[in-house]
């Protein structure tokens, strides 16, 4: 069948029409009529008339040719096939805590050159279908904390601007269905870490962590500790601090930035140890305790810090500690 002829104007007809409108506008301008009034007379907007006039003045008749409406950058159509979704799903299940950027690198090594947005769309589709879980399932929901009161107790509110020696916090993790609580103690000066895993969070476990790990594993005497307002840092824990003559300071409500050191340690432990070795982990408390001590040794003795430097050399926390004691340079 023959196509019906459309009434589309050719480029030459458009140029002639625009040139005639400009000539009429020139005559109207000579009579003292403003461009705003020409809109009703000629049926062309003031901005368009001025644009045609400038183009004609600068380029001549070529300036009146209609410009192409084709975009400078054409977005390619992103098509997610079933095979793409399957390979994204398989790779994500092998690395359940990787984001789209890391998955893109793994897929590229497997021979699949997928764009970042394509992988992101695929992950969203898989999560909506329930075929994969979001990354945040690693962390359980936070327990609701009551506002701590200081009625004749040993602990004190952290004074404004004071820097303490040790920061202690705990995080709740879900390792292959096993919910665990990991306590972490952080030395602000030397970046040292002491950690341990428990199956519950209360003041008795916090006391055990303080007496059997923090006081024994840090290579210096502890005089000050800061904690948040959680109930696990009351009762037995507070009494243990009092018995060992350790000043206990409690952060104001909703101020995790004051506990930034140990909060960053929690993030490092999750990303550099749990996520890296997740596939080889077992949901067993004894196994996880050995793993935590292994990661603690790796962090304290081998992990280099940018802020632990001397003479343009970088050191691990334990190296920096011994350097500060022997060379007396800190």
Image: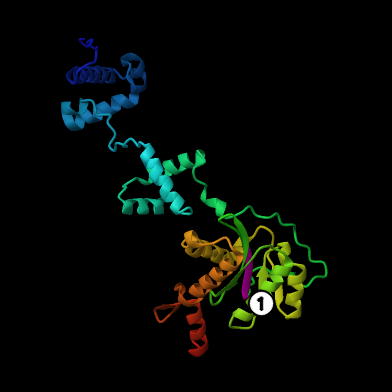
Q: Position of residue 224 (x, y in %)?
A: 67, 76
Q: What span is colored magenta in the figure?
A: 165-170
Q: Position of residue 107 (x, y in %)?
A: 35, 50
Instruction: Determine whether, in the image, residue 216 is placed left or right of residue 101.
Output: right
Q: Position of residue 286 (x, y in %)?
A: 60, 68
Q: Nearer the viewer, residue 48 or 1?
A: 1
Instruction: Determine whether, in the image, residue 31 is placed left or right of residue 173.
Output: left
Quarter of the picture holding the N terminus = top left
Q: Is residue 312 above or below residue 90?
A: below
User: Could you tell me which residue is drawn at 36 percent across and 54 percent down?
Assistant: 106
Q: Is residue 163 visible?
A: no
Packing grade of label 1 (10 A; few <14, some 14-19, many >=20) is few
Q: Is residue 290 above or below residue 29?
A: below
Q: Nearer the viewer, residue 18 or 22?
A: 18
Furthest residue in direction right, as rendered? 152
Kindly state the secondary structure of the residue where label 1 is placed.
helix
Q: Position of residue 151 (x, y in %)?
A: 82, 67
User: Could you tell me which residue is drawn at 73 percent across and 69 percent down?
Assistant: 204
Q: Nearer the viewer, residue 32 or 136?
A: 136
Q: Is residue 192 visible?
A: yes
**Would you identify the image quadrant in which residue 118 lies?**
top left
Please name the residue that numbered disc 1 is placed on.
212
On whether residue 169 falls in the magenta region, the answer is yes
Q: Nearer the viewer, residue 136 or 109?
A: 109
Instruction: Determine whether, in the image, residue 92 is placed left or right of residue 202.
Output: left
**Would you identify the image quadrant in which residue 83 lies?**
top left
Question: Please, what is the dominant secondary structure of the magenta stretch?
Answer: strand
Instruction: Determine whether, in the image, residue 140 is placed left or right of residue 95.
Output: right
Q: Is residue 320 above or below residue 169?
A: below
């Amino acid at each position: 069948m023959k196509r019906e002829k459309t009434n589309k104007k050719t480029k030459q007809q458009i140029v002639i029409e625009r040139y005639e409108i400009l000539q009429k506008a020139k005559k109207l301008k000579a009579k003292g009529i403003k461009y705003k009034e020409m809109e009703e007379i000629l049926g062309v907007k003031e901005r368009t008339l001025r644009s045609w006039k400038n183009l004609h003045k600068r380029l001549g008749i070529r300036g009146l040719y209609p410009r192409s409406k084709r975009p400078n950058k054409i977005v390619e159509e992103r098509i997610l096939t079933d095979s793409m979704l399957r390979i994204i799903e398989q790779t994500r299940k092998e690395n359940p805590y990787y984001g789209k950027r890391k998955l893109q690198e793994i897929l590229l090594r497997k021979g699949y050159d997928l764009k970042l947005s394509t992988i992101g769309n695929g992950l969203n589709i898989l999560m909506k279908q329930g075929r994969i879980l979001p990354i945040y399932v690693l962390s359980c929901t936070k327990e609701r904390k009551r506002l701590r009161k200081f009625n004749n107790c040993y602990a004190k509110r952290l004074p404004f601007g004071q820097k303490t020696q040790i920061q202690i916090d705990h995080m709740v993790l879900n390792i292959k269905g096993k919910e665990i609580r990991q306590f972490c103690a952080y030395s602000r000066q030397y970046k040292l870490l002491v950690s341990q895993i428990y199956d519950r969070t209360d003041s008795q476990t916090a006391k055990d962590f303080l007496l059997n790990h923090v006081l024994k594993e840090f290579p210096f005497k502890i005089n000050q500790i800061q904690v948040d307002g959680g109930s696990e840092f009351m009762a037995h824990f507070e009494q243990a601090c009092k018995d060992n003559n350790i000043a206990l300071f409690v952060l104001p409500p909703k101020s995790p930035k004051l506990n930034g050191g140990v909060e960053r340690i929690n993030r490092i432990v999750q990303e550099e140890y749990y996520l890296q070795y997740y596939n080889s982990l077992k949901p067993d408390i004894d196994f996880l305790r050995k793993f935590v001590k292994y990661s603690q040794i790796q962090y304290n003795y081998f992990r280099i810090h940018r802020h632990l430097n001397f003479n343009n050399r970088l050191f691990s926390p334990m190296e920096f500690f011994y350097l500060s004691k022997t060379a007396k340079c800190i």
